[in-house]
Amino acid sequence: MRSTKLPLSTFEPVTEVRGLADTWWRGPDSLIAIHTGVAECFDAPRFRVARVYSGLGEWGLTGG
């Protein structure tokens, strides 16, 4: 399993969708979803998963 640090300092949290298992971050043309539910249930940080959606442009970030 590959481990990578994400530069979240250039992103802002999307508080509208914050939950126990998922945290979303918004950048200029991308979204990052961080899934932590399984990692917390099993007390195993290595199970944390981040999905990066890049190249979204204005439409992909606003839905309009």
Image (cartoon, grey):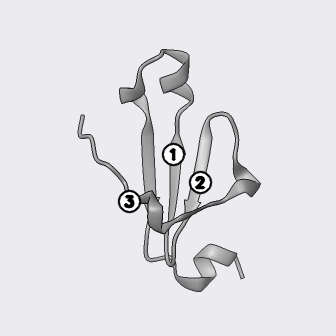
What residue did someone put label 1 on?
Answer: 34
Tag in front: 3 or 1: 3
Q: What is the C-alpha distance between the residues marked 3 and 1?
A: 13 Å
What residue did someone put label 3 on?
Answer: 7
What residue did someone put label 2 on?
Answer: 24
User: Up-down: is 46 above or below 25?
Assistant: above
Furthest-top residue in view?
Answer: 42
**The image quarter in which residue 58 lies:** bottom right
Q: Secondary structure at mark 1?
A: strand
Residue at the spot 43% in from the left edge and 70% down from the top edge: 54
User: Up-down: is 21 above or below 42?
Assistant: below
Q: What is the C-alpha distance between the residues marked 2 and 3?
A: 13 Å
Give the amino acid at mark 3.
Answer: Pro
Give the amino acid at mark 2.
Answer: Trp
**The image quarter in which residue 19 lies:** top right
**The image quarter in which residue 47 lies:** top left
Residue at the spot 72% in from the left edge and 82% down from the top edge: 64
User: Up-down: is 64 above or below 20?
Assistant: below
Side (left or right) of 24 relative to 44: right
User: Up-down: is 4 above or below 47?
Assistant: below
Q: Quadrant of the N terminus?
A: top left
User: Dot 1 surroundings within 10 Å: few (below 14), some, or many (20 or more)?
Assistant: some
Give the amino acid at mark 1.
Answer: Ile
Side (left or right) of 22 relative to 44: right
User: Dot 2 surroundings within 10 Å: few (below 14), some, or many (20 or more)?
Assistant: many
**Sequence-earlier tag: 3 or 1:** 3
Considering depth in this image, is 62 or 23 the residue closer to the camera?
Answer: 23
User: Dot 3 surroundings within 10 Å: few (below 14), some, or many (20 or more)?
Assistant: few
Q: What is the C-alpha distance between the residues marked 2 and 1?
A: 6 Å
Asked if the residue at tag 1 contacts the one at tag 2, i.e. Cβ–Cβ closer than 8 Å, the answer is yes
Considering depth in this image, is 32 or 10 the residue closer to the camera?
Answer: 10
